[in-house]
């Protein structure tokens, strides 16, 4: 009786192992033509993409030290958001100066570009961590993935504040018009993704 029970348990265990191995094989997609394995990256769904309310970015960092890997991932993701902010604000600047009659367009654009860099750096304080995952590879290195977001309102308010406080740009600055153009460009930015 003990022998039959032992054989039955062994058969069930082998069966479960076989099923679990097959399940793992199906999780990775392999191209039949090239033999390449598709890798599923974390944080690639729509909820992790920029929209008309938030800038979002995800990135990774790899290091032997887990905290260093996280710092690298955060810096990479923040850099991505800062670049997106600068591109958007450049587009807003171009639209704004084209629609407004500004006395010294070149000086206004220069100030706007200077403020863009400052605002992109300052608004990084409003970044919020959406999600994070960490993996430890067979080489002992940690790969840290992060997804972050920053509200577009923080950028719009910071830029409007900078422009309205400067005596030279204050006369040419219309906050309502700026916000309207900013919102339009954010929608274009979202549609372009």
Image (spheres, helix red, strand yellow):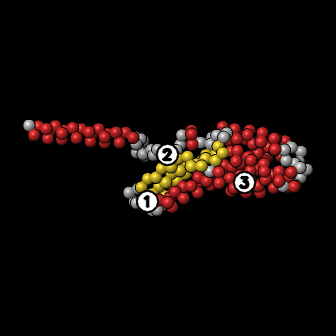
Where on the picture, by quarter, is residue 111?
Answer: bottom right
SS type, badge 3: helix
Q: How crowded is mark 2: few (under 14 residues within 10 Å), some or many (20 or more)?
A: some
Name the quadrant of the N terminus.
Answer: top left
SS type, badge 1: loop
Label 3 – label 2 distance at C-alpha: 29 Å
For marks 2 and 1, the one nearer the N-term is 2
Label 3 – label 1 distance at C-alpha: 35 Å
Name the quadrant of the C terminus.
Answer: top right
Instruction: Tell me what residue is drawn at x 62 percent, y 42 percent.
Output: 50
Q: Mark 2 points at which residue?
A: 42
Pointer 3 with pointer 2, Cβ within 8 A: no
Of labels 3 and 1, the one closer to you: 3
Q: Nearer the viewer, residue 145 or 22?
A: 145
For marks 3 and 2, the one nearer the N-term is 2
Position of 34 with respect to 20 (left or right) is right
Position of 68 with respect to 164 (left or right) is left
Q: How crowded is mark 1: few (under 14 residues within 10 Å), some or many (20 or more)?
A: some
Residue 73 in the image: state x and y as whole percent. Answer: 54, 55
Q: Mark 1 points at which residue?
A: 141
Mark identifier at residue 119: 3
């Amino acid at each position: 009786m003990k022998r039959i029970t032992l054989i039955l348990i062994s058969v069930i265990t082998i069966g479960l192992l076989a099923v679990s191995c097959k399940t793992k094989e199906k999780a990775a997609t392999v191209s039949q033509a090239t033999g390449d394995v598709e890798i599923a990256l974390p944080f690639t769904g729509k909820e992790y993409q920029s929209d008309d309310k938030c800038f979002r970015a995800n990135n990774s960092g790899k290091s032997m030290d887990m905290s260093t890997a996280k710092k690298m991932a955060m810096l990479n993701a923040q850099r991505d958001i800062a670049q997106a902010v600068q591109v958007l604000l450049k587009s807003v600047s171009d639209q704004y100066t084209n629609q407004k009659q500004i006395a010294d367009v070149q000086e206004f654009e220069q100030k706007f570009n200077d403020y863009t860099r400052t605002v992109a750096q300052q608004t990084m304080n409003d970044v919020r961590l959406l999600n994070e995952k960490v993996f430890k590879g067979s080489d002992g290195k940690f790969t840290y993935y992060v997804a972050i977001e920053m509200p577009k309102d923080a950028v719009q308010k910071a830029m409007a504040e900078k422009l309205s406080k400067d005596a030279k740009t204050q006369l040419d600055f219309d906050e309502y018009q700026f916000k309207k153009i900013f919102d339009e460009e954010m929608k274009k930015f979202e549609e372009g993704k």
